[in-house]
């Protein structure tokens, strides 16, 4: 059942094992809070899942921030929505008694873009992020400190919506801020492939294992 917290309609599925990390599942344009739950279970079967619905509507389709046209973003709205999403995560930590230092985003397209923005603008919110078909949507006024954080940007080499060079730019911004960044290249367009899923699963498993030590 969907709940509402800090203005976000969302779904929460508790971790199967106490103390397991939480995946913040962030859908693409037109998705909702149920869209990526199956992917989350596939990537990390034991993890908790926290999946909000974007609060911006574009022709009736939920998104996480406004844009003026394809690839042209409302930067002020990006900033505001990133702070709102970070506040939602903070409220969810209290509501669901989550470990605030073991929350990883898994975002696709628009969801990946807002995850990248949260990492750059609210660096304490996420331990890391799987950023599937992401691009940079904002440049912070002050460089964040992302030491101890990590990211897996995944680009489609034939993506007609997000050129691979844009995903590389986001990877560079995160790396320059001190994050441990691993790029993944898929021989694909904007859709996800088995290689994206397998790489993300392995990447998350490595980080979850390090948290348990």
Image: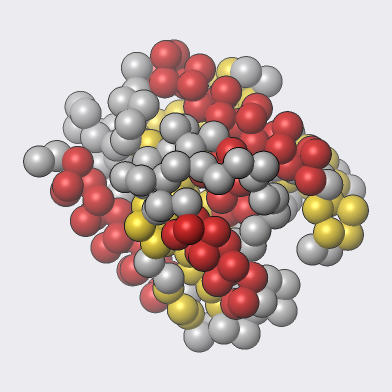
Query: Which quadrant of the figure has residue 197?
Result: bottom left
How is the protein colored in the picture? Answer: secondary structure
Q: Is residue 182 above or below residue 40?
A: below
Residue 202 in percent (x, y) is at: 27, 63
The residue at the far front in this view is: 142
Residue 122 in percent (x, y) is at: 54, 34
* Residue depicted at x 59% and y 67%: 169
* Residue depicted at x 79% and y 63%: 71
Residue 70 in percent (x, y) is at: 83, 63
Residue 44 in percent (x, y) is at: 30, 49
The residue at the far top in this view is: 95
* Residue depicted at x 42% and y 21%: 93
- Relative to 208, 36 lies left or right: right
Nearest the viewer among 164 and 31 is 164
Residue 111 can be seen in this image: no
Query: Which quadrant of the figure has residue 191?
Result: bottom right
- Relative to 23, 9 lies left or right: right
- Relative to 56, 118 lies left or right: left
Q: How many marks?
A: 0
Nearest the viewer among 202 and 114 is 114
- Quadrant assignment for the C terminus: top left
* Residue depicted at x 68% and y 20%: 7
Query: Which quadrant of the figure has residue 161?
Result: bottom right
Residue 179 can be seen in this image: yes
């Amino acid at each position: 059942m969907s709940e509402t917290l800090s203005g976000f309609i969302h779904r929460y599925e508790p971790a199967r094992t106490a103390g397991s990390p939480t995946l913040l599942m962030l859908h693409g344009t037109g998705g909702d809070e149920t869209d990526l739950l199956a992917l989350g279970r596939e990537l990390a079967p034991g993890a908790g899942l926290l999946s909000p619905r974007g609060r911006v509507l574009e022709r009736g389709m939920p998104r996480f921030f406004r844009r003026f046209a394809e690839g042209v973003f409302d930067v002020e709205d990006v900033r505001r929505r990133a702070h709102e999403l970070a506040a939602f995560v903070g409220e969810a930590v209290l509501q669901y008694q989550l470990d605030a230092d073991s929350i990883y985003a898994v975002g696709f397209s628009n969801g990946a873009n807002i995850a990248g923005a949260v990492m750059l603008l609210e660096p304490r919110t996420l331990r890391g992020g799987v950023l599937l078909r992401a691009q940079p949507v904002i440049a912070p006024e002050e460089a964040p400190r992302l030491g101890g954080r990590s990211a897996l940007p995944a680009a489609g080499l034939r993506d007609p919506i997000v050129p691979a060079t844009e995903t590389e730019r986001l990877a560079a911004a995160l790396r320059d801020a001190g994050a441990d960044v691993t790029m993944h290249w898929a021989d694909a367009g904007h859709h996800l492939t088995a290689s994206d899923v397998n790489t993300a699963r392995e990447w998350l498993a490595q980080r979850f294992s390090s948290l348990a030590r």
